[in-house]
């Protein structure tokens, strides 16, 4: 990861850890630009970053699984655990949420009801409806599902959203949030995911109609994450 210089170095640093070329930050990047954050992308082949100087950490999805012995994922769990102990704002998305759950000591296992994929919704729990990150989103949230593994809500965490197939879809522990689902999907990600997810022509209209609420959640999280940055 390259060191920042000049004006960029003075911006709040948001690091995004990625696991696949077609699972980039999407709307997270455009929201970060609006907030004036310096977004650094760390790819699967890059060394993991240190946490000094970070304003927040985002861990994206990908094809890996904690049900298999993958040294890189074990390193990421340790990094996320370090971030938790520091009180760093963290957002884990899909695989990232599973890594966050594991870092909190919760089990992650192959989902007993099979793969969950495609366009859908999750239902916010009463604490989820009261959470600042989901403010103004109503009771149900439009999402993209694409996972086989599932996590338990960590001990002491707040259960924020449930789904029809898997009950544990989002949680918060301190300043860390885990989303099993995808809100970050933009037109580029949709184009990459349409075939493997079997999405039809209506997906483009879904993307357009749901982007405001999905962007709102990401912006709410980022506003909270960067609120303590001088």
Image (spheres, rainbow, N blue to C red):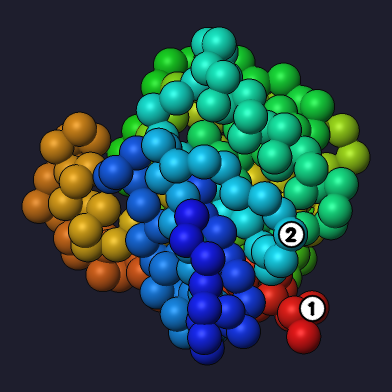
Residue pictured at 52% horizontal, 72% vertical: 4
- Return the residue at label 1: 228
Is 154 displayed left or right of 208 in the figure?
A: right
Residue pictured at 12% horizontal, 45% vertical: 200
| Secondary structure of the residue carrying numbered label 1 | loop
Residue pictured at 52% horizontal, 78% vertical: 5
Looking at the rendered image, the quarter that the C terminus falls into is bottom right
Q: Residues within 10 Å of mark 2 (few under 14, many from 20)?
A: few
Residue 105: quadrant of the picture: top right
> x, y (%) of residue 80?
70, 42
Q: Residues within 10 Å of mark 1 (few under 14, many from 20)?
A: few
Please name which of the two marks, 2 or 1, marks the residue nearer to the observer.
2
> x, y (%) of residue 42?
46, 50
Q: Check the image and report above or below for 80 versus 69.
A: below
Q: Check the image and report above or below for 12 versus 106.
A: below
Residue 215: quadrant of the picture: bottom left
- Residue at the farthest right position: 156
Out of 159 and 31, give the one closest to the viewer: 31
> x, y (%) of residue 88?
77, 58
| Secondary structure of the residue carrying numbered label 2 | loop
- Return the residue at label 2: 52
Q: Check the image and report above or below for 150 versus 41.
A: above
> x, y (%) of residue 196?
20, 32
Out of 215 and 87, give the one closest to the viewer: 87
Residue 146 in sight from this viewpoint = yes
Q: Check the image and report above or below for 133 versus 25.
A: below
């Amino acid at each position: 990861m390259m060191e920042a210089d000049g004006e960029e170095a003075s911006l709040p640093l948001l690091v995004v850890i990625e696991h696949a070329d077609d699972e980039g930050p999407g709307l997270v990047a455009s929201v970060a630009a609006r907030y004036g954050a310096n977004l650094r992308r760390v790819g699967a082949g890059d060394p993991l970053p240190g946490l000094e100087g970070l304003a927040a950490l985002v861990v994206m999805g990908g094809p890996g699984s904690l049900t298999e012995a993958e040294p890189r994922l074990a390193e990421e769990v340790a990094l996320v655990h370090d971030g938790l102990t520091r009180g760093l704002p963290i957002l884990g998305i899909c695989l990232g949420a599973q890594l966050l759950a594991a870092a909190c000591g919760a089990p992650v296992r192959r989902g007993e009801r099979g793969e969950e994929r495609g366009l859908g919704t999750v239902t916010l729990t009463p604490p989820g409806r009261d959470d600042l990150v989901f403010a103004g989103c109503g009771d149900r949230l439009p999402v993209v599902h694409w996972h086989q593994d599932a996590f338990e809500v960590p001990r002491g965490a707040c259960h924020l959203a449930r789904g029809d197939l898997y009950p544990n879809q989002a949680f918060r522990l301190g300043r860390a949030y885990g989303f099993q689902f995808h809100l970050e999907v933009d037109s580029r990600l949709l184009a990459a995911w349409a075939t493997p997810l079997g999405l039809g022509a209506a997906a483009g209209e879904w993307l357009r109609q749901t982007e405001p609420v999905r962007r709102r959640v990401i912006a709410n999280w980022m506003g909270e994450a960067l609120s303590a940055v001088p």
